[in-house]
């Protein structure tokens, strides 16, 4: 900066040079703050500032050196500049073989970018409801795969051989765990009113009689499934010295969900909490965030990752965090909560009009209406043709309800972060049109 100012003073009048430096300093100040403090910014950066920061960091990688002699098998060669732009210039990826956060000699900028993103998202999650976590890591893996990687780390470090998993009808976590070779013991659920809940008696009985056990608890899923009582499960895990992994897929957007996890960490044992980047921070699909109360746990997960990793989900999250900022994220949270209330009210009205009812299920993001006596698959197909994306229409007793023989057919609607009031209102209009027309 001193050199730039010196050249300006040589080429233009002093008052003009000083005015130009004021503008430049103002634009660079947020970038400097992020590089220095690595905190989730209160205010968003301009897109120009984000691009400057990413270009500055990626220019440190060895493939940007015009005189570099590149004879390795992995030299960040790309077929076209378009490919490099799609990767924001981080063509070397992140990490090294056997450690996903290890600094990479050819990727100085990517290594720095990764450390900044890990620190920033950890700060974000602490400020958004989990002040009792100590460290975090962004992985270029889906939530299900990151749960599998987390359990693989627990197997390597603690000898975990079995995971107790209260039933959730979602294949991704199951397949992620299956890759580790850890035995999955599905825990039954119980029906209480309309709600499907974890059977705590079954969990407690099984945990007492299972050697080398661990537990997966789930905070966010579709109605009629309710969030697991993570505080009670954490206490149980603490009593029996059993590791607990919490699948918090899209829970960061909900203050109530984050409060329940914070209480679980304070009251008992929580080893790892996993959440999605796209569902919480409006990024493309492909990344997840792993946080833990103990820094050494995150180190163990990082050491379990095989090979180098794509930098794309990491840089996308960094860009998203800096584009949103804390104040805007709090606004988005408030909008989500308001839209969820609106969704429930409109769905209740629709249910009454068509002789159905709203399911009495506690859920911070979704709600469901019965469609008893109707063709659930036909409703789902027609909504899709009406350009409504996201609903789930489930027939009575069908897979998806997280319990055998659920007594209702139903359709689930969501009001997740980033959705607008217009989305909610139009979706309900289309639902009424489809259901009333059957």
Image (spheres, rainbow, N blue to C red):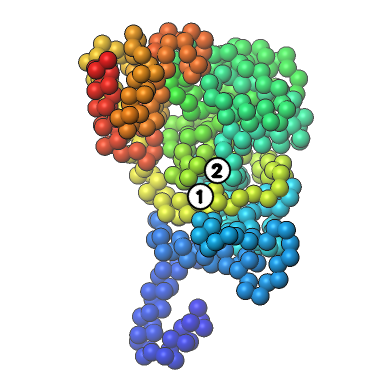
Q: Image point 32% across, 24% down: which residue?
A: 382
Q: Quadrant of the C terminus?
A: top left
Residue 175 image offset from top left, x and y in percent: 62, 28
Residue 312 position (above or below residue 297): below
Residue assigned mark 1: 317
Q: Image point 39% across, 76% down: which residue?
A: 22
Residue assigned mark 2: 287
Q: Pointers 2 and 1 in contact (CB under 8 A)?
A: yes
Element at label 2: loop
Give the CA separation, mark 2 to mark 1: 8 Å
- Residue closest to the eye, 287 or 232: 287
144 relative to 101 in the view: left or right: left
Residue 254 image offset from top left, x and y in percent: 43, 35
Q: Image point 71% across, 31% down: which residue?
A: 180
Q: Image point 51% across, 13% down: which residue?
A: 403
128 relative to 428 in the view: left or right: right
């Amino acid at each position: 900066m001193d050199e730039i100012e010196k050249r300006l003073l040589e080429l233009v009048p002093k008052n003009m040079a000083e005015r130009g430096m004021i503008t430049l300093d103002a634009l660079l100040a947020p970038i400097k703050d992020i590089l220095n403090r690595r905190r989730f910014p209160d205010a968003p950066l301009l897109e120009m500032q984000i691009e400057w920061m990413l270009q500055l960091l990626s220019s440190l990688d060895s493939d940007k050196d015009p005189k570099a002699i590149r004879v390795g098998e992995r030299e960040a060669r790309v077929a076209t500049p378009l490919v490099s732009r799609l990767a924001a210039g981080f063509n070397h990826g992140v990490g090294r073989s056997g450690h996903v956060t290890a600094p990479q000699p050819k990727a100085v900028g990517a290594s720095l970018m990764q450390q900044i993103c890990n620190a920033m998202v950890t700060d974000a999650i602490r400020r958004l409801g989990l002040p009792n976590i100590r460290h975090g890591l962004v992985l270029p893996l889906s939530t299900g795969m990151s749960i599998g990687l987390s359990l693989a780390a627990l197997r390597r470090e603690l000898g975990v051989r079995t995971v107790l998993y209260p039933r959730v009808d979602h294949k991704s976590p199951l397949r992620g765990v299956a890759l580790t070779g850890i035995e999955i013991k599905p825990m039954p659920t119980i029906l209480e009113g309309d709600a499907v809940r974890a059977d705590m008696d079954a969990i407690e009985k099984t945990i007492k009689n299972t050697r080398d056990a661990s537990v997966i608890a789930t905070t966010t899923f579709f109605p009629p499934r309710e969030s697991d009582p993570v505080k009670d499960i954490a206490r149980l895990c603490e009593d029996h010295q059993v590791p607990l992994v919490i699948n918090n897929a899209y829970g960061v957007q909900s203050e109530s969900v984050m409060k329940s996890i914070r209480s679980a960490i304070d009251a008992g044992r929580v080893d790892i909490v996993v959440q999605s980047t796209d569902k919480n921070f409006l990024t493309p699909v492909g990344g997840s965030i792993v946080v833990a109360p103990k820094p050494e746990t995150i180190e163990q997960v990082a050491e379990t990752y095989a090979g180098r990793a794509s930098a794309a989900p990491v840089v996308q999250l960094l860009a998203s965090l800096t584009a949103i900022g804390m104040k805007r994220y709090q606004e988005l949270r408030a909008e989500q909560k308001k839209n969820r209330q609106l969704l429930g009210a409109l769905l209740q009205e629709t249910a009454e009009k068509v002789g159905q009812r709203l399911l009495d299920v506690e859920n911070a993001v979704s709600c469901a209406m019965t469609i008893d006596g109707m063709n659930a698959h036909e409703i789902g197909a027609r909504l899709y043709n009406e350009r409504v994306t996201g609903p789930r229409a489930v027939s009575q007793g069908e897979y998806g309800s997280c319990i055998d023989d659920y007594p209702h057919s139903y359709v689930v609607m969501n009001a997740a972060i980033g959705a607008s009031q217009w989305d909610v209102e139009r979706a309900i209009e289309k639902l009424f049109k489809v259901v009333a027309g059957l």
